Amino acid sequence: MFRIVLWAFAALYLLIVGIAPAALAPLTLAFAGLTAVIAAVPPSVLLLAAVAMWLKRKPTPAKPATA
């Protein structure tokens, strides 16, 4: 019985090791493309976009309570 369990774990390990790199390849390529796009944009433009988004989403200050 123990030998069957070991063979099952060995088969499962080989399936995972063999399938995982192929399954992760599209994700890896997508992140590589995203990195290339971000690297092509000048830092000043990225900073300007970040400031614009922060100003757009900036929370409004709370009004003081009147008694």
Image: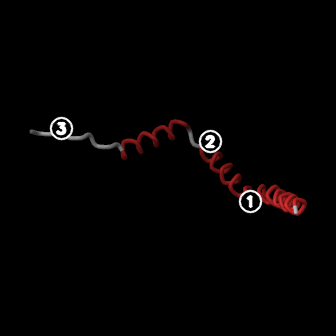
Q: Is disc 1 placed on a helix, strand or loop?
A: helix
* Contact, mark 1 vs mark 3 (Cβ under 8 Å): no
* Contact, mark 2 vs mark 3 (Cβ under 8 Å): no
Q: Quadrant of residue 19?
A: bottom right
Residue flagged by tag 3: what amino acid is it? Pro
- N-term-proximal mark, 2 vs 3: 2
Q: Which residue is mark 3?
A: 64
Residue found at the far right of this picture: 3
- N-term-proximal mark, 2 vs 1: 1
Q: Which residue is mark 2?
A: 39
Is residue 2 left or right of 59 when viewed as pictured?
right
| Closest to the observer, 44 or 5 | 5
Q: CA distance from mark 2 to mark 3?
A: 45 Å
* Quadrant that contains the C terminus: top left
Q: Quadrant of residue 8?
A: bottom right
Residue flagged by tag 2: what amino acid is it? Ala
Query: Which x, y percent locates residue 10?
Result: 86, 58
Q: Nearer the viewer, mark 2 or mark 1?
A: 1
* Contact, mark 2 vs mark 1 (Cβ under 8 Å): no
Q: Is disc 3 placed on a helix, strand or loop?
A: loop
Q: Which residue is mark 1?
A: 23
Q: Nearer the viewer, mark 2 or mark 3?
A: 3
Is residue 13 left or right of 50 when viewed as pictured?
right
Query: Which x, y percent locates residue 64?
Result: 18, 38
